[in-house]
Image (cartoon, rainbow, N blue to C red):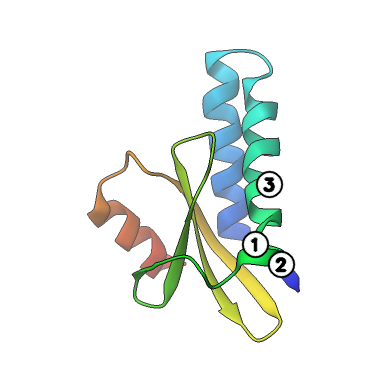
């Protein structure tokens, strides 16, 4: 199964990295590797996560309070957003509409 991470989701990952890196040196790297491992796990579990908004499935990250929003289309998983779960639901819906 192929995983494609959209540019908007890559920016989300970068933002999360810098947020945690500012808290403590090296924490940004831990964030990145943890979330990327969760995303990689989608090769086996894509589609089993609850549809949270419209057709977007939501994978809750195991270590950090982030969620990965994705769509599964055939043999491809498309990551649309990686957002902090502490954001308001309205903000997350807006973020998903913007792509």
Residue 54 appears in the rendering? yes
- Position of 89 compared to 21: left or right? left
Work out which residue is located at the far right of the displayed protein and give it.
2
Query: What is the x, y in percent for residue 72?
Result: 58, 77
Q: Nearer the viewer, residue 57 or 29?
A: 57
For label 3, the residue is 36
Residue in the picture at 23% in, 56% down: 90
- What whole-number distance in Å separates the C-alpha atoms at marks 3 and 1? 10 Å
Q: Are marks 2 and 1 in contact (CB under 8 Å)?
A: yes
Number of numbered labels in the structure image: 3
Callout 2 secondary element? strand
Of the residues tagged 2 and 1, which is closer to the observer? Answer: 1
- What whole-number distance in Å separates the C-alpha atoms at marks 2 and 3? 11 Å
Lower sequence index among marks 3 and 1: 3
- Among the 4 quarters of the image, the one containing residue 13: top right
Lower sequence index among marks 2 and 1: 2
Lower sequence index among marks 2 and 3: 2
Residue in the picture at 59% in, 13% down: 24
Callout 3 secondary element? helix
Tell me if mark 2 has few (under 14), some (14-19) or many (20+) residues whose alpha carbon lies within 10 angstroms of its own: some
Q: In the figure, 90 relative to 33: above or below?
A: below
Residue in the picture at 69% in, 46% down: 37
Q: Which mark is residue 3?
A: 2
Of the residues tagged 3 and 1, which is closer to the observer? Answer: 1
- What whole-number distance in Å separates the C-alpha atoms at marks 2 and 1? 8 Å
For label 1, the residue is 42
- Position of 91 compared to 56: left or right? left
Query: What is the x, y in percent for residue 23?
Result: 52, 15
Q: Nearer the viewer, residue 37 or 27?
A: 37
Q: In the figure, 90 relative to 61: above or below?
A: below
Residue 5 appears in the rendering? no
């Amino acid at each position: 199964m192929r995983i494609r991470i959209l540019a908007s989701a890559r920016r989300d990952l970068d933002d999360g990295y810098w947020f945690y890196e500012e808290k403590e040196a090296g924490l940004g790297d831990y964030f990145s590797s943890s979330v990327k491992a969760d995303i990689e796990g989608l090769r086996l579990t894509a589609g089993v996560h609850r549809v949270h908004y419209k057709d977007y499935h939501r994978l809750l990250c195991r270590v950090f309070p982030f969620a990965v929003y994705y769509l599964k289309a055939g043999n491809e998983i498309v990551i649309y957003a990686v957002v902090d779960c502490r954001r308001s639901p309205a903000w997350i819906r807006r973020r998903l509409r913007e792509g």
